[in-house]
Image (spheres, rainbow, N blue to C red):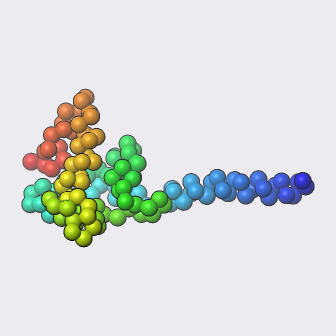
Amino acid sequence: MSMKIRYRLLVLACLLLVLPLALAAAVDPGPAELSIDSNAKGKAVKIFKHHEHQKRMKCVDCHHATEKGKTPRSCVTCHTDVKNRSTKTGAPGFKKAYHGVCLKCHKTHKDKPALRKCKTCHGK
């Protein structure tokens, strides 16, 4: 095999390895902080530290319906009702979906009891 062909194969192999990483890095990380409003009176999460959670979790841990390489959509896209299963999408209610994901992790932090209290996320 000639040097020219070897060189081209090496370049191609590098591109095939690097390109997926570059595409994954190009996905918008979203805002550093945001408010999560379920339209349940007084129950909004006033300040959700999005980037802090991204350091500990994968995007798909919360945005489970997002296709690989795509920008995640808002949870209310599928979880359209606060309490009841969505008649439109079949997804569980907003409250159940959030608490299912959030509390599963928050309850494991025995060293940080504040994370297990409602007011930590929902305010006073």
Between residue 67 and residue 39, name the one nearer to us.
Answer: 67
> Which residue occupies the extreme top position in the image?
111
Residue 33: tell me if it is visible: yes
Residue drawn at x 36%, y 49% as measured from the top left: 61
Can you say whether 40 is above or below 101 in the image? below
Q: Quadrant of residue 106?
A: top left
Identify which residue is drawn at 26% across, 64% down: 90
Q: What residue appears at the point 23 percent right and 43 percent down from the top-left corner?
A: 103
Side of 119 where 111 appears, left or right: right
Seen as rendered, the residue at the extreme right is 2
In x, y percent, where is residue 63?
A: 35, 56
Q: Nearer the viewer, residue 100 or 31?
A: 100
Residue in view at x 48 percent, y 60 percent: 69
Residue 110 image position (x, y, % from top left): 24, 30
Q: Is residue 79 above or below residue 98?
A: below
Seen in the image, is 73 located left or right of residue 120?
right
Q: Position of residue 6 (x, y in %)?
A: 83, 54
Q: Is any part of residue 37 visible from this angle?
A: no
In the rendered image, the residue lying farthest to the bottom is 88
Question: In x, y percent, where is residue 45?
Answer: 19, 54
Q: How many marks?
A: 0
Q: Say above or below: 107 vs 65.
A: above
